[in-house]
């Protein structure tokens, strides 16, 4: 359980230390407010893993915005306001990605690239669109967005990182997790198992 709320003076001291590069001070802020931010994220996404990812993203952006915090304001109120705004932005982004899938993806788009086949390669042509859409819909929003941007839109890791405002390592991790989960969802929908040769491969240099 999080400790009692710190005093205004304590928060101010932590912020000042953070701005000077004190990692322990930032860790203290994250520990103090993690549950509050997580609860905001969870109300928007409704899934624990996805809320965890979104909470990490929110804290990263809060860290980058610390220098803009008006010391006359209440820090927790400011933090929750930022969290809600970022969750709204995330929701809009995910909704836009879903609309892109429904509007733009067809069987030709889903034809796997020879250098980077995915679980879609195991599907018969007539099944690809319906099965992929259903499998993609079952992914957490953060993973679905990463896989869509990499494997359908064919953006580079750096381009995805720039668009999502995330570290490249986080992007690679989400893509890997998303591909693994996508393969599992396709197996579930088909009611069978892929052979080892049809499992989702890793691209070289993914880590």
Image (tube, rainbow, N blue to C red):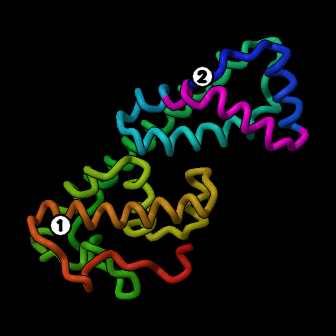
- Mark 2, secondary structure of its residue: helix
For image coordinates 58% across by 63% down, the residue present is 159
Residue to which mark 1 is pinned: 187
| Image quarter of residue 108 | bottom left
As drawn, is 92 to the left or to the right of 161?
left
Is 15 contained in the magenta span?
Answer: no
As drawn, is 116 to the left or to the right of 23?
left
- What is the quadrant of the N terminus in the image? top right
The front one of 24 and 203 is 24
Relative to 204, say whether 170 is above or below. above
| Image quarter of residue 144 | bottom left
| Image quarter of residue 199 | bottom left
Q: CA distance from mark 2 to mark 1?
A: 40 Å
Task: Point out the stretch of residues depicted in magenta.
Answer: 20-38
Counting from the top left corner in percent of width and height, residue 66 is at 78, 32
Proximity of marks 2 and 1: CB atoms separated by less than 8 Å: no
As drawn, is 206 to the left or to the right of 61?
left
**Badge 1 local density, few (<14 within 10 Å), some, or many (20+)?**
some
- What is the quadrant of the C terminus in the image? bottom right
Relative to 43, say whether 25 is above or below. below
Relative to 162, say whether 49 is above or below. above
Label at residue 12: none
For image coordinates 26% across by 50% down, the residue present is 137
Q: Main secondary structure of the magenta part?
A: helix
**Badge 2 local density, few (<14 within 10 Å), some, or many (20+)?**
some
Residue to which mark 2 is pinned: 80
The front one of 107 and 78 is 78
- Mark 1, secondary structure of its residue: helix
Counting from the top left corner in percent of width and height, residue 14 is at 82, 28
């Amino acid at each position: 359980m999080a400790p009692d709320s710190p005093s205004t003076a304590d928060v101010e001291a932590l912020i000042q230390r953070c701005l000077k590069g004190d990692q322990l001070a930032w860790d203290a802020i994250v520990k103090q407010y993690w549950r509050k931010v997580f609860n905001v994220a969870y109300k928007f996404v409704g899934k624990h893993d996805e809320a965890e990812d979104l909470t990490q993203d929110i804290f990263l952006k809060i860290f980058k915005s610390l220098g803009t915090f008006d010391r006359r304001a209440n820090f927790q109120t400011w933090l929750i306001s930022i969290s809600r705004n970022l969750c709204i932005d995330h929701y809009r982004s995910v909704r836009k990605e879903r609309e892109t899938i429904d509007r733009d993806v067809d069987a030709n788009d889903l034809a796997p690239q020879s250098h980077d086949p995915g679980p879609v390669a195991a599907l018969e042509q007539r099944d690809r669109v319906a099965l992929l859409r259903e499998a993609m819909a079952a992914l957490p929003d953060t993973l679905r967005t990463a896989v869509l941007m990499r494997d359908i839109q064919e953006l580079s890791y750096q381009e995805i990182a720039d668009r999502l405002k995330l570290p490249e390592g986080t992007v690679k991790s989400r893509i890997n997790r998303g591909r693994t989960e996508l393969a599992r969802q396709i197996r579930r929908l088909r009611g069978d198992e892929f052979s080892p040769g049809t499992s989702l491969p890793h691209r070289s240099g993914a880590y």
